[in-house]
Amino acid sequence: MKILVAVKRVVDYTVHIRVKADQSGVETANVKMSMNPFDEIAMEEAVRLKEQGIAKEIVVVSIGNNATQETLRTALAIGADQAILVETEADIQPLAAANILRVIAQQESPQLIILGKQSIDSDNNQTGQMLAGLLNWPQGTFASKLEVQNATVRVTREIDGGLETLRLQLPAVITTDLRLNQPRYLSLPNIVQAKRKPLRVVPVQELMVNIQSRLKTLSVNTPDKRRAGIKVNNVHELIQKLKHEAQVI
């Protein structure tokens, strides 16, 4: 089995986010970047499937500028066999990302595609579902457990009412949730070895995909600071406070 894993380079989750002075977006210059945490879980799960002998090859793909190679090298150090960078300076929105991944999937012919359920920069939670639709493959979203058996994959997924179990025919698209696994720490030998693994750079123009933005960001603002809470002595006082707040709003 070949597994395709999609990863994204985002502002590290430990960084304090700053909005640009012109309110056009989030400041990324001279800011620590890293692999999207949900994609890191996807990468870890693919490696575990390979360690179990279920998968023979892991291909990792990312979309972005030349600096994204650093994120792909991290994925190679985790355990991917080869990497593909679809290089572009454009702001890639979910539908364009799904179309790009569709072309890569058609070229690589994986039996399983794993990616994070969402990226922590935009939190759209759309790319995996769109990719499955474009490929006409079954999908298992918010996966907290995976079991591959012959030509099927059993997915336990988290829903509002608890857990749901699906059995999907391969090939399939899986998006990962937080409780699927705990990503491993990188070892120095694996980091060194990752530098020797193949990384192919493909200009986005070669894929013949429409990446035109369909959404326009009008402005980005920092949220208002939370007001301090207050204590009330009884229900009557609470009702009066709520009535007053409603009138103010």
Image (cartoon, grey):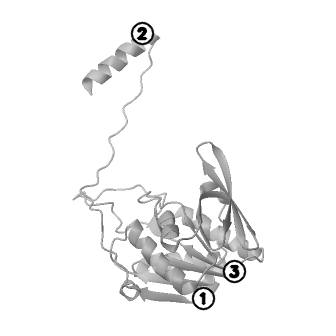
Along the polypeptide, which appears first: circle 1 or circle 3?
A: 3
Q: Few, some or many C-alpha atoms within 10 Å of disc 2 (few <14, some 14-19, many ≥20)?
A: few
Q: 10 Å neighbourhood of mark 1: few (<14), some, or many (≥20)?
A: some
Q: Give me the C-alpha separation between circle 3 and circle 2.
A: 65 Å
Residue 78: which quarter of the image? bottom right
List x then y, in percent, for residue 196: 60, 90
**What kind of residue is marked 1?**
Lys
- In the picture provided, is 143 more to the left or to the right than 86? right
The residue under label 3 is 1
Closer to us: mark 3 or mark 2?
A: 3
Name the residue nearer the viewer: 242 or 3: 3
Query: Quadrant of the image for the C terminus?
Result: top left
Q: Is there a contact, CB below 8 Å, between mark 1 and mark 3?
A: no
Relative to 148, say whether 191 is above or below: below
Seen as rendered, the residue at the extreme left is: 22
Dot 3: what SS? loop
Q: Secondary structure at mark 2?
A: helix
- Residue picked out by circle 1: 197
Q: Which residue is mark 2?
A: 236
Residue 185 can be seen in this image: no
Q: Tell me which residue sits at (55%, 64%) in the image.
A: 116
Q: Which quadrant would residue 115 be assigned to in this image? A: bottom right
